[in-house]
Image: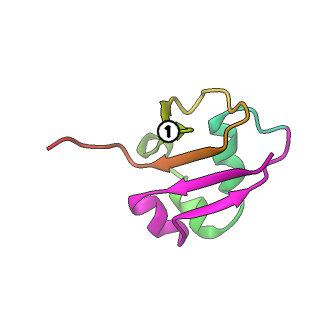
Amino acid sequence: MAIEMLYFAWVREAIGVGQERVDPPESVATIAQLIDWLATRSEGHAGAFADRSRLRAAVDQVFVALDAPLGTPREVAIFPPVTGG
């Protein structure tokens, strides 16, 4: 199952790309497990995903908790918390 990953703000800067297409193993069943798997891809990924409290996620443009089931998304976005102004 190929997923289009989108990264924003400092997450994108740490990883070095704004998007990538990934094909996680079938054992990846939640957003948190996807993040764990992504963290193994490079030092930039590991650094970006080291502190989960600083991450938010959206699956197919719908905000979800990190413990949400992954399902079969076309797109997963990872970004820092959004602040109002």
Residue at 49% in and 67% down: 14
Q: Which part of the image, by quadrant, shows the N terminus?
A: top right
Q: Nearer the viewer, residue 6 or 48?
A: 6
Residue at 67% in and 38% down: 73
Amino acid type, mark 1: Gln
Residue at 84% in and 37% down: 27
In the displayed structure image, the side of residue 49 where residue 63 appears, left or right: left
Q: To which residue does mark 1 refer?
A: 61
Q: Is residue 9 magenta?
A: yes
Colour scheme of the picture: rainbow
Up-down relation of residue 71 to residue 1 (above or below) = above
Q: State how many labels appear.
A: 1
Residue 2 location in percent, x, y? 76, 50
Q: Nearer the viewer, residue 72 or 35?
A: 72
Residue at the left extreme of this rendering:
85
Up-down relation of residue 67 to residue 15 (above or below) = above
In the displayed structure image, the side of residue 28 where residue 53 appears, left or right: left
Residue 68 location in percent, x, y? 61, 27
Q: Nearer the viewer, residue 62 or 7?
A: 62
Q: Which residues are magenta?
A: 1-26
Q: Which part of the image, by quadrant, shows the C terminus?
A: top left
Residue at 54% in and 70% down: 17
Q: Is residue 52 magenta?
A: no
How would you rate the neighbour count of disc 1 (Cα within 10 Å): few for under 14, some for 14-19, many for 20 or more? Answer: few
Up-down relation of residue 21 to residue 58 (above or below) = below
Residue 45 location in percent, x, y? 60, 62
Residue at the bottom extreme of this rendering:
16
Judged from the image, the secondary structure of the residue bearing numbered disc 1 is: loop
Residue 23 location in percent, x, y? 79, 53
